[in-house]
Image: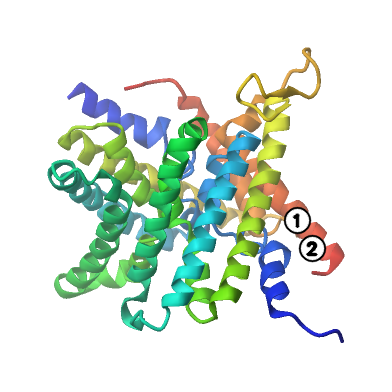
Amino acid sequence: MERLLSIIFIYILVENFVLQRFFGICPFLGVSRKMETAVGMSMAVIFVMSMATLVTWLLYTFVLIPLNLEYLQIVTFILVIASLVQLVETTLRKISPTLYQGLGIFLPLITTNCAIMAVTLLAVREEFAFIEAVVFGIAASIGFSLALVIMAGIRERLELADVPDVLQGPAVTLITAGILSLAFQGFRGMLTL
Amino acid sequence: MAEHNPYVDDLSRGIIRENPVFRLLLGMCPLLGVTAYFINGLGMGLATTAVVVASNVVIASLKNYIPTQVRIPCFIVVIATFVTMVEMVLQAFQPALYEALGVFVPLIVVNCVILGRAEAFASKKPVLRSLADGVGVGIGFTLALGILALVREVAGQGTIMGPDPESAILLFGEGFEPMGLFGQPPGAFIALGLLLGFANMLFKKLNI
């Protein structure tokens, strides 16, 4: 239990996926312009990331390892993520059209979100047990969402700021992210597994 | 006007005019993640170049056999295969670099630069032109990684060619106190932001 709690704390704050580990920078820069889209993207990521960790962990442990096919890890994981995204999209459209409307456009983007791939690979590399891996997936996705939502809040205000001409757009967003990351640096070393 | 060589054009496009990092803002995760040291940045750039060149060539030669509806999964499988090969080669011949790059090696598979080239170029153009395009984009990406890594290592560690103490060259002598921030995650964001601003200024001045 203690270990699970530390996994949650570490991957939300200490080792935040976006701000400390640099996974999922593209959606972080791409959809953080408005709070509404940021929340939509966060929901979709939480959903897919938790599912992906669960499925790939089971697949790796019970199919790839017994068959000595570890070298197929990359191919398998990316295909699982791609089909999972597709599956989630189709299911959601059937059972919850409202949620689908909300998440719809973000789902296809998730396939190339490297945070998802990273979480599945790390769950295996860190040799987490099953429950730990699932908790890790959920915590990492919450960490991602936290960073995204904070950033969206900052960027909505940044719209009104007077930014030098050449720094407009992604440049100033990255510098802002740097300062945000500096704030998260305060959690550094607070807790290790 | 001089005669136009499409190969030269394809090769040069990815380096400056459509540089994947400075102009298109793709592939940000490895860019920030591995650039604490110049060697790592360069290694990552070369690994990515190998994958983008190989996948461009294979996809361009298979383009008539890949059904349009399932092309993205097909591209991803081709890319994933080459990433696996690169990972094995690195693990076998460059274990130190492999360790340093860590999970970012398998993550080359989700680098949008590569899938972007497959979708936008290799799936429509002939093999040799796709080869030229892959090389150009690879050089452009490596260039960006190299510049950012150089800035970060010089400012953050005061060395080049680190982290291995045997090859590391101290630039400013023993008494130099490096700005540790640039070796850390916040410094990566800030350095890249400033670099993008600088690149914008340069592009505007030169009217590219």
Residue A67, percent across and down? 15, 45
At horizontal 81% and vertical 85% (from top left) the residue drawn is: B3
* Residue B53 drawn above or below residue A71: below
Query: What subunit carries mark 2?
Result: B
Verify CB contact (< 8 Å) between mark 1 and mark 2.
yes
Q: Calculate the distance from the C-alpha at mark 1 to the C-alpha at mark 2.
A: 6 Å
Q: Is B56 on the left-hand or right-hand side of B173?
A: left
At horizontal 22% and vertical 47% (from top left) the residue drawn is: A69
Residue A30, percent across and down? 51, 60
Residue at numbered disc 1 = B199
At horizontal 75% and vertical 56% (from top left) the residue drawn is: B199
Query: What subunit carries mark 1?
Result: B
Q: Amino acid at mark 1?
A: Ala
Q: Is B195 on the left-hand or right-hand side of B69?
A: right
Residue at numbered disc 2 = B203
Nearer the observer, A23 or A178: A23
Asked whether the viewer can see residue B30, the reply is yes
Residue A118, percent across and down? 37, 45
